[in-house]
Amino acid sequence: MACALEAASDPAIAAAAAVLAPFSGPARTRLIGRGERLDAMGAAFVNAAAANFLDYDDTHFPTAIHPTAPVAPPLLALAEQHGHSGEEVLHALILGLEVECRIGHAVSPGHYARGWHITSTCGVFGAAAACAKLLRLTADQTEAALGLAASQSAGVVENLPTAAKNVSVGGAARHGLFCALLAQAGYTAAPGAIEGRLGWARAMGDEADLDLMLGDLGERWETADVAFKPYPAGFVFHAEIDACLALHDRLTIAPDQIAEVVVRGDQLLLDRGDRETVTNRDARVSIPHAAAVALVRGRAGVAEFEQAAVDDPALWAFRAKVRAEHDPAAPPASASVTVITTDGRSETATVTDARGGPANPLPDTDLEAKLRDGARAAGLEDRADDIIARVWGLDGGADIAGLMRAAAK
């Protein structure tokens, strides 16, 4: 809710809503932070795209899946239309996230490394499973929904620095709901559509690890490794940001007294972030920009990753001082940052468990503050407390339609 509210007013989200509006059916549902109403599949698309838009949404650490964005929006749309309780939605959400992350884990890390955007490609399975649960489909129908989803899985890493990333995330939400509805109507799919000889996993280049996918169902929970972000940037940059913020507070020197910054991390950090920063989308996956905002401004909020910050002459100049080095011994999602001053001194900070990660989770108060920021951005600041109360009340059976009314214009 916080992430979708924060992005709701962006022109790209408005454009998606405008494109879908003429094709929407008569049964309309709400868009988070906006005033339009779309049919359930259109609303699922727009709300999923918005939730993922700022790279601010939750992350499953073993796979880099952002699991909730493609799964929650179709559930909210269905629940608003059909009166499902918050408890039912949460149950379906948890099971959808588990299916999505297990399938992703079974083909990681090769799937992502090969260029498939795993949030989108696996998100469609999570959405299909979650919607199947909420629609009370039979086991056979649920199997069919997942098999149908195998033919609707798409999204490529090359598109991550553009709005095309959010199109595939929105598509995962929309297509997952579509597949569940098709299965409900009697459509079937091959039993091995995911793991079969010519199924989804092998077609996308991987042999699925069936133990990771199916082992210890109901006992081992992948959702325990899902964490929330304190910064609107790829989670692999969060340890770097933490380290730079610590150095900013420790050194208390002006940026022009810093001669060089060396960021060391694993190969994924370098693959994702050792790039020139030209646009705000570059900034959210940029090692130099993450270091610059933390060391120059001493903060890393939404404003620090917008285009105005990218174009800030002080940040532009500072980014040129930052270089990245591969550290083969660095644990995943960790970083070590060394600041070298103009008088030759050096100071290093190393972060292994980034703030917000599974080992260092955000407190509820930080999550509430994040939602208040999102509500403010959407022009709904006066409703923030109501939205927060309704979200916390979902497991007590709170009304989804009431939540969506509070979160929409």
Image (cartoon, rainbow, N blue to C red):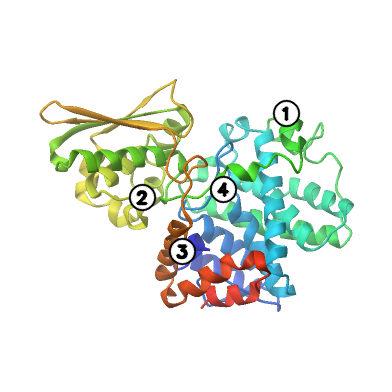
Q: What is the crowding at mark 4: few (fewer than 14 residues within 10 Å), some, or many (at least 20)?
A: many
For residue 65, side relative to residue 245 (left or right): right
Q: Which mark is residue 184?
A: none
C-alpha span from label 2 to label 3 = 25 Å
Q: Position of residue 390 (x, y in %)?
A: 57, 71
- The residue type indicated by label 1 comes to Glu
* Residue occupying image coordinates x 51% and y 45%: 159
Where 142 sits versus 349, above or below? below
Q: Nearer the viewer, mark 4 or mark 2?
A: 4
Q: Which mark is residue 371?
A: 3
* Residue occupying image coordinates x 44% and y 21%: 329
| Residue marked by disc 1 | 207
* Residue occupying image coordinates x 59% and y 32%: 114
Q: Position of residue 252 (x, y in %)?
A: 17, 42
Q: What is the crowding at mark 3: few (fewer than 14 residues within 10 Å), some, or many (at least 20)?
A: many
**Circle 4 SS class:** loop
* Residue occupying image coordinates x 72% and y 56%: 130
For the view shown, which residue lies furthest in the left direction?
Answer: 343
| Quarter occupied by residue 62 | top right
Q: Decide: marks 3, 4 in contact (CB < 8 A)?
A: no
- The residue type indicated by label 3 comes to Leu
Q: Earlier in the sequence, mark 2 or mark 3?
A: 2
Q: Earlier in the sequence, mark 3 or mark 4?
A: 4
Q: Decide: marks 2, 3 in contact (CB < 8 A)?
A: no
C-alpha span from label 4 to label 2 = 22 Å
**Circle 2 SS class:** loop
**Circle 3 SS class:** helix
| Residue marked by disc 2 | 279
Tell which of 393 and 167 is nearer to you. Answer: 393
Q: Which mark is residue 66?
A: 4
